[in-house]
Amino acid sequence: MTQGWERVEKDLNKGVVVGMSVYLFYKREPKEDPVTDVVVILNEQTPPQGYTKVDVNLNSILRGDAIYLWYRTTPSNPDVQRDAVQELAIEFGKHAVTPYGWSKIKVDLNSAKEGKEGFGEPTFLYFRKGYKELPKMKPLSFNENGDFKILQLADLHFTNEEGTCRDIPVDMDCKGDATTIEYVEKLLDREKPDFVVFSGDNINGGGVSDARAATFKFAEPVVKRRIPWAVVFGNHDDENDLTREELLEVMRRMPYSLTERGPVDLPGIGNYILKVFTDSTKAATHAFTMYFLDSHAYPESDDQDGFESIKSEQLDWIIQSASTFSKLSSKPNAAAFFHIPIWDYHEESNTNKPIAKLGDAREQVSSPKKNKLSALEAFKTASDIKVTSCGHDHVNDYCLEKEGIQLCYAGGAGFGAYGAEHLGWPRRARVFMISDFGNTIQTWKRTFTPNLPMIHFQTIYSA
């Protein structure tokens, strides 16, 4: 690479069988007039006056439209510098979401027949002018009635393309990711949650060429409603072109995201704590805690099967954090969210008492193997956790009480993942209502059918 030039890290000819790879480069020159606009011109279209042509056909193959980039520069002054083009990016996918603070050029860079058709990967250019600060957010807090509502969306399995529909009735009109989005939007408008947690496998493990674009897509319904949200990673989220670290960096720059990396000395990415306060004033007290844990994915050793366990360092961190919070006069209760269920989601009893369970178990619990390190024992030691909730097993949606802690599944929400819709068991999502400033926890689910009926309402904790 020529010194000083930055490459836009996506091949513009992605998915084109015949042809060469094409990459965009740009260079920051403080002494030159800044670039203030960028356009794409097809074939014989008339370019705007005062623009300069980049004399390279971005298709660079023997078919399709001739596509050229044109840019405008403006004599420098403080206002121009503030609003100049700062960065370029490429997104793959026909229905790519425009990131916050960016502008999309609505021309597929792999187009044909005057942009009406295309080949290869649908590819779009974005540019960012100036710097748009993220919206300011107030701390999470209970409303004046002492209520705080959480919506959990599990196993959405989004792509940056159309997406697929798996395990649906033969007469169902399903449009892949668009159908998942339709139901998520209806659910958000019905429940009006104060907070949304995406509990892993938000992105599909295959068929994703642009995990950044898939991230914008799954969060968009929440972002445009200005609802605070957070994420834990599942075993499929980082199986594409971005690592968990890179995905976290994408989310960190998105509006209303509260997702954090967490302590760097803990195993995994995304072990963090969010606090819910009594109100939004400076005098508010910490009234409820949400723990988020990286439940990892597959064992590193080839001679092991199944899934990795939550590590002892993570559990010690929860215990230590809970000990600190227990010294507060408010003594906040807590919930914990992770993707892969812990062993204790199995229905076998640790005592001679019968198991209390509400909801469906349509598949075996796909958890790490049972071992001496018990996450449930750690949660009991912490003493503030009253409920945990996970995803991973798409057609389990129960809450199971184990030694005073409710272990819940959300149930799978995404139409692009396996399910049991074809067997009369619709996709679904879980809601938690935290009431009495954290002293009462109720939960229910809504199924993704036309009227979003509520099922399995229960009070899982009351002080």
Image (tube, rainbow, N blue to C red):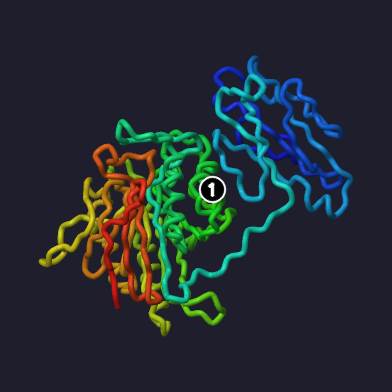
Q: Is residue 299 visible?
A: no
Q: Is residue 342 visible?
A: yes
* Image point (47%, 58%), residue name: 230
Q: Is residue 461 above or below residue 53?
A: below
Q: Is residue 254 above or below residue 321?
A: above
- Please tell me which residue lies in front, 270 or 104: 104
Residue 294 appears at what percent x and percent y?
A: 40, 56
Q: Is residue 41 above or below residue 365?
A: above
The answer to which image quadrant residue 454 occupies is bottom left
As drawn, is 442 to the left or to the right of 149?
left
Q: Which residue is mark 1?
A: 246
* Image point (61%, 64%), residue name: 136
As drawn, is 340 to the left or to the right of 224?
left
Residue 401 appears at what percent x and percent y?
A: 22, 64
Specify the farthest residue to the bottom. 329
Specify the farthest residue to the front. 451
- In terms of secondary structure, where does tag 1 sit? helix
Residue 101 appears at what percent x and percent y?
A: 66, 50
* Image point (82%, 51%), residue name: 81
Specify the farthest residue to the left. 352
- Please tell me which residue lies in front, 302 or 105: 105
